[in-house]
Image: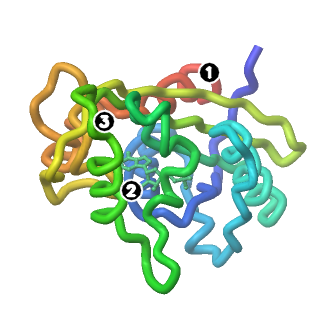
Amino acid sequence: MTRRLEPGRLVLASHNAGKLREFSALLAPHGLELVSAGSLGLPEPEETGDTFIANATIKALAAMRATGLPALADDSGLEVAALGGQPGVRTADWAIRPDGPRDYAAAMARIASEDSSADRRCAFVAVLVLTWPDGHTEAFEGRAEGHWVAPPRGPQGFGYDPMFVPEGETLTFGEMTPEQKARHSHRARAFAALAAACL
Ligand code: IMP
């Protein structure tokens, strides 16, 4: 039996503006006030895990301990079939530049250059971990299957959205409205499971 979350404040354990926008929309109907770790000036913990669930748990527990509030974390990434599932949990790292902000154009170009096969299947994966102030946690996974395109297309969304086309569609996430993306997205699917169990 999963635990229900009472209405009140919930910390989003993320400094990512794109994730914050999407969770604000997803949580709006549920009577929870979302505050982000970024806006509270919380430090970003090191993501030392080898799995999405391990890293989401690290982030959720760090935000919960720093605030005493329930916390929600999302660890997510893109698994490219022909690259054996890479970049996977290292998806954010592929965009890191030593001396500047993250460079997603370079990260998307790297995927296109390393995957020279005809197989362009890939999937976005999100694992959400919700933690309560007593340390209890619940985890939920969502996947969006699709394929990647090069060059990237569309100004919407964030991160790798312009290179991802979900199954059965022709537009990339970068060309979709937030509502269209939410019909297919890994994050929205993981959140639907969380909402059914805990909200
Ligand atoms: P992390 O969860 O902080 O480790 O970072 C996730 C990485 O995957 C970031 O580089 C994101 O840009 C990328 N990512 C996760 N979800 C999405 C999405 O919905 N659209 C585009 N990129 C995403």
Farthest residue toward the bottom? 99
What percent of the width, then of the height, locates residue 166? 25, 29
First-in-chain label (1 vs 2): 2
Q: Which residue is mark 3?
A: 182
The residue at the point 78 percent across, 58 percent down is 62
Residue at numbered disc 1: 197
Foreground residue among 177 and 160:
160
Query: Which badge, 3 or 1, comes first in the chain's sequence?
Result: 3
Residue at left offset 34%, top offset 55% = 110
Q: Is residue 35 above or below residue 137?
A: below
**Residue at position x 67%, y 68% from top?**
44
Please give left or right for residue 124 compared with residue 53 in the image: left
Labelled pair 3, 2 in contact (Cβ < 8 Å): no
Which SS class for mark 2? helix
- For badge 2, the amino acid type reads Arg
Residue 56 occupies which quadrant of the picture?
Answer: top right
Tell me how far mark 3 sits from mark 2, CA to CA: 12 Å
Identify residue for label 2. Answer: 21
Q: Is mark 2 within 8 Å of ligand 1?
A: no
State the residue lying farthest toward the top.
1
Where residue 25 appears, x then y in whole percent?
A: 37, 47
The label on residue 111 is none
- Give the secondary structure at mark 3: helix
- Please name the amino acid that badge 1 sits on: Ala
